[in-house]
Image (cartoon, helix red, strand yellow):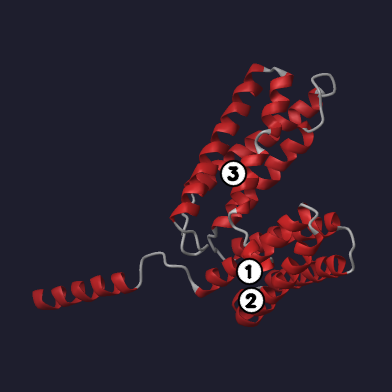
Amino acid sequence: MKKYFLLILGLALILSTAMPLGAASPLEKDMAAFDKAYITAMISTSQGKRATSKKAMERTMVEWASFKKTHADDLIKSNADKADLIIINQMLSDAKRIVRANGSLNEAHIILEGVRDVFLNIRKRNSIDYYIDYITGFHKPMNAIVLTARGKTPETLTESMLSRIKYNFKLAWQSWEHLQKASFDPELFSFDAKKEAQRQACIKAETEALNKLKKVLNEGDKEEIIKAAVGIKPNFDSLFLLFSNFENVR
């Protein structure tokens, strides 16, 4: 009996070495490959870079076609999944058409932003834990805070606006805590040691910015609140940029 126990233990050790616990699945790897192209398109359209946006959209459509061909059947487990994949396909097609026709890059960017929200819903339904979804979850309340405070003065920042900032800060804080606790696989997103150090530095800096906003919200100084509210965006943008790949669109 002891002999069989040792044999099983030995096999388990071999398998655990050959297949690391928590290793990314082929589906997750292809999601990450798509996101590298897709995030690049989102950033370039946001920055108003037309030539780069065209290249990034073309690259995104190539990755999307590959992803659909390989994994559409894996994700169509419900009518909701099927409907969401159709929505993503339409969003990407619309954004591509606008960019190709030299249309509004801002309009294309807004359409592209919706893709990550729909993908997040698909992954939630299929119990897929995916790091970028934590970034997406934080983005919405973070952006609401920034848009509410941007361009305001202590005189024009109303109590209603202040209440909105406080409400979204609670949501942002919760989402950020989830992101900090989320597991991250550097290999999945092609992060070398330098890039991983940059990710950790961005997280540290953003945590400090959020703590500063929390402090001034408690103190009530509107001028400081406006500065701190707008100040939570740059570090987030730097974090998000790490998941792009502009090398493929130059």
Residue type, mark 3 in image: Ser
Residue at (62% x, 75% y) in the render: 77
Local SS, label 1: helix
Report whether residue 107 is seen: yes
Residue 111 lies, in percent from the top left, at 80, 60
Would you place residue 238 above or below residue 53 in this image?
Answer: above
Residue type, mark 2 in image: Phe
Give the position of the N terminus as an image quadrant. Answer: bottom left
Residue 13 lies, in percent from the top left, at 24, 70
Residue 202 lies, in percent from the top left, at 55, 43
Instruction: Depth check: give the residue in front, 140 or 190.
Output: 190
Circle 2 residues within 10 Å: few <14, some 14–19, many ≥20: some
Would you place residue 116 above or below residue 221 in this image?
Answer: below
How many marks overall?
Answer: 3
Q: Earlier in the sequence, mark 1 or mark 2?
A: 1
Question: Do tag 1 and tag 2 residues touch (Cβ < 8 Å)?
Answer: yes
Report whether residue 121 is seen: no
**Residue 34, labelled with which disc?**
1
Answer left or right for 114 relative to 131: right
Q: CA distance from mark 2 to mark 3?
A: 28 Å
Q: CA distance from mark 1 to mark 2?
A: 7 Å
Q: CA distance from mark 3 to mark 1?
A: 24 Å
Please name the residue that numbered disc 2 is placed on: 67
Residue type, mark 1 in image: Phe
Circle 3 residues within 10 Å: few <14, some 14–19, many ≥20: many
Q: Earlier in the sequence, mark 3 or mark 1?
A: 1
Please name the residue that numbered disc 3 is placed on: 175
